[in-house]
Image (cartoon, rainbow, N blue to C red):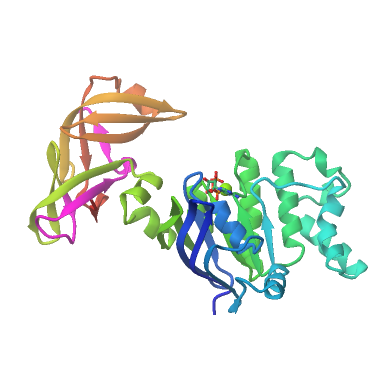
Amino acid sequence: MALLRIENLGQAYKDAVILTDINLSLERGEVFALIGPTGSGKTTLMKLIDLLTKPSLGSIYFDEVDVTEAESDRLAARRRMSLVQQKPIVFNMNVYDNVAVGLRWRGVAKNSIREKAEHALDLVGMADYAHRDAKTLSGGETQRIALARALVIQPDLLLLDEPTANLDPNSVSKIEEVIEHVIKEHEISVFMTTHDMVQGQRLSHKVGVLIDGQMLQMGKPDEIFNAPQSKEVAEFVGIDNILAGTIEKKDGELADVKVAGGAISAISGFEKGESVYALIRPEDITLSLARDGGSARNVFGGVINKIITLGSLVHIEVDCGFPLFVVLTARSTIDMGLVVGTQVFISFKATAIKVIRRWS
Ligand SMILES: Nc1ncnc2c1ncn2[C@@H]1O[C@H](COP(=O)(O)OP(=O)(O)OP(=O)(O)O)[C@@H](O)[C@H]1O
Ligand SMILES: [Mg+2]
């Protein structure tokens, strides 16, 4: 039985359609990560689930009760969920009171408040900060207090809107540790949004990709990351090489995909003549200065067109009749003496290519 179920949900503000026909369900103890580019509607969907705003279309069920309309049902459901907002605000009081205040509002007995609040502060590693003025906390500390405040009521459903956006890596891993711990120890369901695909993959059981208000794909994390079903999702999950082509020849599972300027060997279930995209992750491509006789089916000579350094990684565009993006470390780029114009060889296995149907 699903704790949360959403059917044909739609949201519009005046003429602007923000969400279209969203369907999803969340079981007890399950973690759902909603990923998607900025402005795609993630926070809007989160607010609808938090039952603060009513949807323009569709239905929301909490614990199999329809909570789309009736105020009393919405209120009862709201008491069993808590939301950590994208930009959490703390109240102008000390850390302990920030966490305890929700329990006081709920009329929880005094002795029980202390125990619960202390436990929640412990959980997020902020017990030593109980008497600090909450307004003086850093971004990462504020986020942890917001999390403690959400957890203290022991919700059935925890809603986290970008829990680690704009935090330093150290704070990110602390927050993630807390989330992982809570998921494991308590039978809590989590619905979170994130820009960070790796985080979505790491923490969740199910991932949904929201682009332009539409849930383009939903599934297990590795399905989304390794087998995107559309060009939009492939782009969003960081597959830089998306080549439009046609299946030219078929030999069992092995297919020749004709792309503009060349042909590549891939494993594919599609038939001869079908229009497809060939998807190749840059990290699955090997770049070398000499043609080597490895086992890769795809070996192409090419010329470096562009080199873009991003931190310790270097993105290299190679023209091998068609453009291919490769990622190397800055170290190996220097060691190999790679510059624009260098002649190189590119190789990748047929199994490194994911072939999807091409639309339009
Ligand atoms: N109350 C509102 N009235 C009109 N438009 C709104 C309203 N709230 C949100 N929008 C619009 O809906 C779209 C989706 O916004 P939303 O905040 O849900 O995106 P998001 O995916 O959470 O983005 P981000 O990743 O930046 O947080 C945006 O274009 C936004 O301007
Ligand atoms: Mg948002």
Residue 214: image location, x then y, percent: 43, 56
Q: Is residue 308 above or below residue 144?
A: above
The residue at 74%/46% (across/down) is 89
Q: Residue reaching furthest right?
A: 110
Residue sitting nearer the eye, 91 or 41: 41
Q: Is residue 316 above or below residue 284?
A: above
Q: Is residue 197 left or right of residue 235?
A: right
Q: Is residue 123 visible?
A: no
Does the magenta-highlighted stretch encompass residue 87?
no
The residue at 86%/42% (across/down) is 133
Residue 208: image location, x then y, percent: 46, 59
Q: Which residues are magenta?
A: 265-290
Residue sitting nearer the eye, 57 or 127: 57
Q: Is residue 22 left or right of residue 316?
A: right
Does the magenta-highlighted stretch encompass residue 276?
yes
- Location of the N terminus (image quadrant): bottom right
Residue sitting nearer the eye, 230 or 294: 230
The residue at 83%/46% (across/down) is 129
Residue 52: image location, x then y, percent: 66, 61
